[in-house]
Image: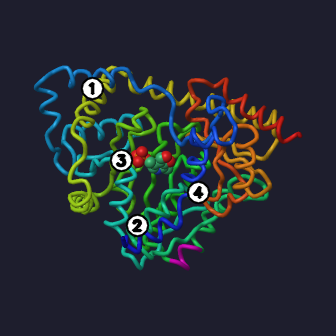
Amino acid sequence: MELSKLIQEMMNEPSPIRQIMKMASRQNIINMGLNPDEVISYGGGWVGHHPPEQLRQEYGNICNDIEKFHDAGKYSPTLGFEECREAIAKMEKELFGVKLGIENIIIGQSSTQLTHDLLVALANPDDKILLFDPTYANYPGQIKMTLRNAKIVRQRVLDTEGWEYKSEEEMAEDFKEIYEKEKPKIVLFPSPDNPSSQVFGDTFVKTIADMCHDGKSFMIVDYAYKTQCFISPPKYFSWNPSDYPFMIALHSNSKWGRGLGRRLGWVDASEEIIEAMERVQQCTILCPDTMHQFAFASYINKSLADGSLKKYLEEVRNAYKKAADATIEAIDEFLGLPRLIPQGGLYTLMKVNEDADEFVKRVLKNTGVLFIPGKGFGDSLKEAVRISYGPHVENIGVIKEGFKRVADYLKK
Ligand SMILES: Cc1ncc(COP(=O)(O)O)c(C=O)c1O
C-alpha cells in the first residue's frame, strides 16, 4: 500500500504531545507497574467545568420534540444559519464590544477545521507563515497539511534565561525585524496563549496589525480562551473587522462552555474573507452542524437577555483563576522551579533545567504524575513542561498532591 507522500512524511513526525499521551494510556500505565487510578495528569489540554445548565435544556427541548429533532437533522447553509450568526454578533457586541454584521461571520465545525480552511483561503504553498515560539502545537502540522512546503518562521517571545515573556516593546521590535526580513503572508497566534497562558499586550498586537495592514499580510488571532482572561482584557479583544480588514478572529465553543465534544467554531472577519471561507468550507465540511447551532443560538439569545451568560462566564473565569493560583502555589511550595503566572487559559510553563522528554518519562514512571514535554510547542521549551490545571478545575485539591509526589521523588 502506498499512502500519499505528504502523510508518509507527517507520520514520520508524530506529535510529541500525542506520543506522551499514548505513553500515559491505561494499559501502558499498568505495564509500568503503576495503578492507573492513582495517576495525576497535568497533560489534558481541556476544560473540566460543567456546561451551562440552560444550554443542556436547549438540547433537551430539541431531543424531546419529534418535529424539532427532525428539523435539527437538516443541512445548514454553508455559512451557518442566520439566526445563529446573529446570536454570535449580539454576543460579541455585549461581551467585548465588537461590532459585527452577519456578513462578517462564518460558522464551522471547530476552530481546528476553520484554521485549516483559513490557511487554504489566505496563503499559497510558497508563502511564509509566522508563528511564535512557543505556540500552539497543532499549527505546524496544519500548515504542512494545507500548504505543504510553506516556510514557518518563528519569533521567540519567551526569555528562557529569566523565564518570563519579553517586554511588549522588545517583542514589537523583534516582530518588525522579522516581518521586514521574511514578509510572512500570515501571522497566527492565540491570546490567551496555549501553552503559556500569557495574553499579548496592545502595543505588540497593534504593531503586528499595522505591519500586516501595510504589508497586506493577514493576522489571525486564535481566541480559543478569550472568555478565560484573568487580567483586564486588552483593547484588541474589541477590534472590528471594519477597522482592521486584514485581521481574522478565530473562535471556538470548546473551552468556554465545555463544548469540546459538541463543538462549533466561527470566524469573524471582513466580508471578502468570509466569502472566500464559504467557498473553502463547501469543499471541506459542506456545512456546520445544525443541532449545535439550534441549541447554541437559542441559549445565547436567552442567556444574554436574562444576564445569565455573563454570570456563567464570570464564575467559570474565577474558577480557572483559582485553579491557576493553586497550581502556582503548589509549584512554589514543593518544587521551587521557574514558572509563568497565567494571565488566562488553562496552563503554565515550568522550566525543569534538563531535557524535558526524559524528565517527563522519568517522573511518570516513578510517580504516576504526567506533564507534557515542551518541545512540541517550540525549541524554547526543550527544557520545560506544560502543566494544565484545566481538567482539575472542579477538584482543585488534587493539584497540590501531584507536585508533592514529584517533589518527594526528586528529593531522593
Ligand atoms: C489555541 C488553541 N486553538 C484551537 C484549539 C482547538 O479548538 P477546537 O476545539 O475549536 O478545534 C485549541 C485546543 O486546545 C487551542 O488550544
Rendering coords of residue 234 (x, y %): 53, 45
**x and y percent of residue 221 in the render?**
45, 54
Tell me the residue at 27%/26% (across/down). 59
Q: Is residue 180 magenta?
A: yes
Image marks 4 and 1: residues in contact by CB distance under 8 Å: no
On screen, residue 90 above or below 154 = above
Amino acid beneath label 3: Ser
Q: Which is more toward the observer, 134 or 400?
A: 400
Q: Is residue 236 visible from the viewing direction of this image?
A: no
Question: Reading the chain from its start, which is encountered first: label 2 or label 3?
Answer: 3
Q: Is residue 190 above or below residue 92?
A: below
Q: Say which element carries label 1.
A: helix
Question: Which residue is outermost to the right?
Answer: 412
Q: CA distance from mark 2 to mark 3?
A: 17 Å
Marking on residue 16: 4
Instruction: Decide which of tag 4 and tag 2 comes sooner along the chain.
Output: 4
Sequence order check, earlier mark of 1 and 2: 1
CA gap, disc 3 and disc 4: 22 Å
Q: Secondary structure at mark 2?
A: helix
> Within 10 angstroms of label 1, few (less than 14), some, or many (20 or more) residues?
some
Q: CA distance from mark 1 to mark 2?
A: 35 Å
Which of the labelled discs sits on residue 59, or is there none? 1
Seen as rendered, the residue at the extreme left is 67
Q: Secondary structure at mark 4?
A: helix
Residue at mark 2: 145
> What is the crowding at mark 4: few (fewer than 14 residues within 10 Å), some, or many (at least 20)?
some
Mark 1 and ligand 1: say if the CB distance to the nearest ligand atom is below 8 Å: no
Please give the name of the residue rendered at 72% of the width and 29% of the height, measured from the top-left corner.
400
**Nearer-the-camera pick, 159 or 24:** 24
